[in-house]
Image (cartoon, helix red, strand yellow):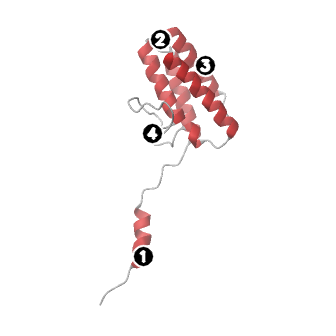
Amino acid sequence: MTRYFGPYLLTFAVALLPLPAAADAASEIVNAAQHAEYAAQATSIDVAHAHLHHALNCLVGPNGMDFDATALNPCKGAGNGAIPDTSDAAKQKSLEAAANKAREGLKANDLSTAQKDAAETEKMLKAIK
């Protein structure tokens, strides 16, 4: 005797699929601001650049422009990046501006300029509600 489990088996198989991580733009913004703060307090250009990369990774996400897969992504598992996870157009524009300021800091060759850009990035992110 053959038993038919078609719809039940499919339901069971779908239930076993991993669920996508819930997007948490708010925590991604907080993490990005924290790493911008670390960059602003850095004592070397390399450390400032490292933390600016961390902040940028949180903002743009793994599929975003200038995501650095060789740098830490402190927002891994929180979503796809604050920018893609934000649906509010005004907030997205503010996040893009903060990402651009972080990019400026990454282009800086001297510590004081990178720190200044990082502090501005932090300020911009903390102003986002």
Measure how far apart labels 3 and 4 are at the Cα level.
24 Å
Instruction: Tell me residue 69's x, y (percent).
Output: 40, 33
Sequence-wise, the earlier of marks 4 and 2 is 4
- List the residue tagged with mark 4: 76
At x 38%, y 80%, the residue is: 5
Q: Nearer the viewer, residue 19 or 99?
A: 99
Question: Which quarter of the figure has residue 94?
Answer: top right
Sequence-wise, the earlier of marks 3 and 4 is 4
In which quadrant will I find the C terminus?
top right
Contact check, label 4 and label 2, Cβ < 8 Å: no
Residue 90 higher or lower than 17, as above or below: above
Query: What's under tag 3, amino acid-wise?
Result: Glu
Measure how far apart labels 3 and 1 are at the Cα level.
56 Å
Query: What's under tag 1, amino acid-wise?
Result: Tyr
Q: Which mark is residue 109?
A: 2
Residue extending furthest toward the left: 1
Contact check, label 3 and label 4, Cβ < 8 Å: no
Question: Which quarter of the figure has residue 117?
Answer: top right
Q: Nearer the viewer, mark 2 or mark 1?
A: 2
- List the residue tagged with mark 1: 8
